[in-house]
Image: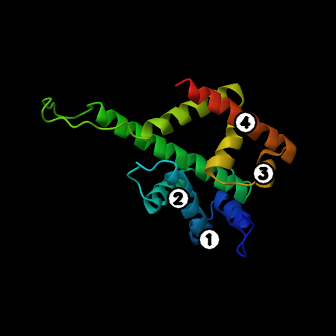
Amino acid sequence: MAEPAVPITALLLAWGAGDERALEQLVPVVYAELHRMAHRHLRREPHQSLQATSLVNELYVRLVDAQAVKWHDRAHFFAISSRLMRRILVDAARRRHVRKRGGGANPVTLDEAQVVAPGRGQDLIALDEALDALAAFDQRKARVVEMRFFAGLSVREIAAVLEVSEDTVTRDWNFAKTWLLRELSKR
């Protein structure tokens, strides 16, 4: 993800300083990458009812409300965007899970009930819980997973956002993958 002709970082800094026109200029520049990021998220969650465009639109609403964020650069923007997309999808999976368990539903007889295979929404919730546990153990490693797995940032971009070496990012990524695999296999 190289910096395009329109400098994303400059637009982010201007937006962060209160320039609403910068946000209007930023959206078309980052939209395609956010849409690709949304597709990556949704590929991992095929039972999700959201479409990529809807996910990007929901992200936009949340970004507009995130005025307290001090943007550093484009990699930071995409890392935050990926984290917000993950939150949107996890929230949607939790709502689906509640509905499946009868939350707010009218009771049905056994004859009316359908057998439903457990969806991958539970996998997303389990991954979210495992990432939260990893963050409690080591926040940086959890951020590396979010940026690498969900945002698709390169090791170099993650190193720049976290202000660590690329070797540190690689070690964190390898550790986190092993830790998450072990954690998820317990569930």
Element under disc 4: helix
What secondary structure is found at the residue carrying circle 2?
Answer: helix
The answer to which image quadrant residue 22 occupies is bottom right
Which residue type does callout 2 highlight?
His
Give the number of the disc on residue 39: 2
| Amino acid under disc 3 | Val
Which label belongs to residue 155? 3
Q: Earlier in the sequence, mark 2 or mark 3?
A: 2
Q: Residue at x 53, y 50 (%)?
A: 85
Mark 3 packing: few (<14 Cα in 10 Å), some, or many (20+)? some
Mark 1 vs 2: CB contact within 8 A: no
* Labelled disc at residue 29: 1
Disc 3, SS: helix
Closer to the camera, 15 or 127? 127
Q: Nearer the viewer, mark 1 or mark 2?
A: 2
Q: Badge 2 local density, few (<14 within 10 Å), some, or many (20+)?
A: some
**Nearest to N terminus: mark 3 or mark 1:** 1
Percent position of residue 58, x then y: 46, 55
Residue at the far top: name it. 186
Instruction: Give 129 or 29, whichever is nearer the viewer.
Output: 129
Q: Is residue 144 visible?
A: yes
Residue 7 is marked as none
Can you identify the residue that label 4 sits on?
Answer: 141
Q: Whole-Å distance between the Cαs marked 3 and 1?
A: 23 Å
